[in-house]
Image (tube, rainbow, N blue to C red):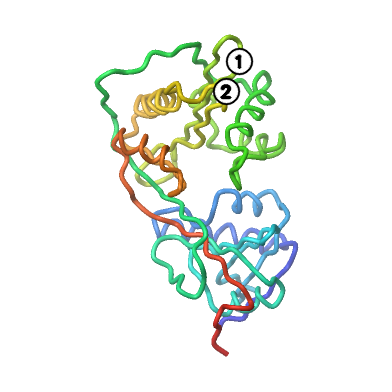
């Protein structure tokens, strides 16, 4: 029987066990064990409520609850555990829970759906768009602040992407996977109009690429810049010898989904954010 306990700070041994659990889970499932941001919380000892299912001193399962209104939680592997949910709801009246794939969500209310799309490379288009400005690669010292401003303006209403800080950007730039040759900026009349940040999953058995962040400043929308920058990013990924690429998009973002579908992206998986409330969630005793 699972016995969950929580802590605001992992011990050094627990931290290493959790990271090992992530790696083993990813090897078993063939996909990410937990959201990249939550993995980073463990790596960099960030703020969170760590929930552990222990067998003696050994970590069997793990989940991370991130503060917010409401708080959000995700288990390593992406499921929902009833006993963990019950324990969390004794402390938090409402919680949003990220599930991956076919987890049972009937006891809660789905409030958001994130789609994972994939495309085979190369992507062939009849007429490649011509850049109306200068496309160059990202320079951390020169471009960090201007890119943050452009990104945060583009995602002003986005729950995760719209309020990045210098520290959050610096953490990503210091990751082993970061490659500035895959981070592209479009300048028009001296302004940063759009960007496309790509990533190659070098350590994955299938070695695939990803459109990590694609953003168009609100002042430059309606000019086809998103399509142009995605194509530029996909071509850069292909030239690194990668045969497929992925990206995540909100199901509710009809315009973006239409763009990606027109480029040949197809649905691979849907992840759901499920809201559970202590007042209306039936839990077995």
Camera-nearest label, 1 or 2: 2
Disc 2 is placed on an element classified as helix
Closest to the observer: 188 or 252?
A: 252
Few, some or many C-alpha atoms within 10 Å of disc 2 (few <14, some 14-19, many ≥20)?
A: few
Name the residue that disc number 1 marks: 191
Where, by quadrant of the figure, is residue 62 drawn? bottom right
> Could you tell me if the residues under marks 1 and 2 are in contact, i.e. CB atoms within 8 Å?
yes
Q: Estimate the x, y position of residue 194 in percent, counting from the top left.
A: 53, 24
Residue positioned 32% across, 18% down in the render:
128
Residue 120 higher or lower than 26, as above or below: above
Q: Estimate the x, y position of residue 17 in percent, counting from the top left.
A: 60, 63
| The C terminus, quarter of image | bottom right
Name the residue that disc number 2 marks: 219
| The N terminus, quarter of image | bottom right
Disc 1 is placed on an element classified as strand
**Which mark, by number, is residue 222?**
none
Q: Estimate the x, y position of residue 13 in percent, counting from the top left.
A: 68, 63
Residue positioned 28% across, 18% down in the render:
127
Residue 135 higher or lower than 247, as above or below: above
Horizontally, is 238 left or right of 150 in the view? left
Where, by quadrant of the figure, is residue 119 drawn? top left
For marks 1 and 2 on the same chain, the one whose residue lies earlier in the sequence: 1
């Amino acid at each position: 029987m699972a016995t969950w306990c929580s802590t605001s700070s992992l011990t050094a041994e627990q931290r290493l066990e959790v990271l090992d659990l992530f790696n083993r889970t990813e090897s078993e499932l063939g996909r990410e064990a937990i959201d990249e941001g939550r993995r980073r919380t463990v790596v960099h000892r960030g703020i969170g409520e760590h929930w552990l299912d222990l067998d003696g001193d050994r970590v069997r399962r793990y989940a991370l609850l991130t503060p917010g209104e409401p708080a959000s939680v995700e288990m390593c592997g992406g499921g929902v555990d009833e006993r963990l949910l019950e324990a969390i709801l004794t402390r938090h009246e409402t919680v949003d829970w990220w599930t991956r794939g076919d987890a049972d969500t009937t006891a809660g209310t789905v409030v958001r759906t994130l789609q994972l799309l994939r495309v085979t490379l190369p992507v062939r288009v009849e007429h490649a768009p011509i850049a109306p400005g200068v496309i160059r690669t990202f320079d951390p010292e020169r471009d960090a602040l201007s890119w943050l401003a452009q990104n945060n303006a583009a995602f002003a209403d986005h729950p995760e992407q719209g309020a990045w800080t210098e520290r959050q950007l610096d953490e990503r730039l210091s990751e082993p996977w970061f490659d500035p040759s895959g981070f592209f900026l479009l300048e028009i009349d001296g302004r940063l109009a759009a960007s496309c940040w790509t990533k190659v999953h070098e350590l994955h058995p299938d070695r695939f690429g990803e459109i990590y962040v694609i953003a168009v400043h609100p002042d430059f929308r309606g000019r086809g810049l998103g399509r142009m920058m995605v194509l530029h990013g996909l071509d850069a990924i292909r030239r690194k010898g990668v045969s497929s690429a992925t990206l995540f998009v909100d199901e509710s973002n009809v315009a973006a989904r239409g763009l990606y579908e027109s480029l040949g992206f197809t649905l691979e998986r849907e992840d759901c954010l499920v809201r559970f409330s202590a007042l209306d969630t039936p839990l077995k005793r």
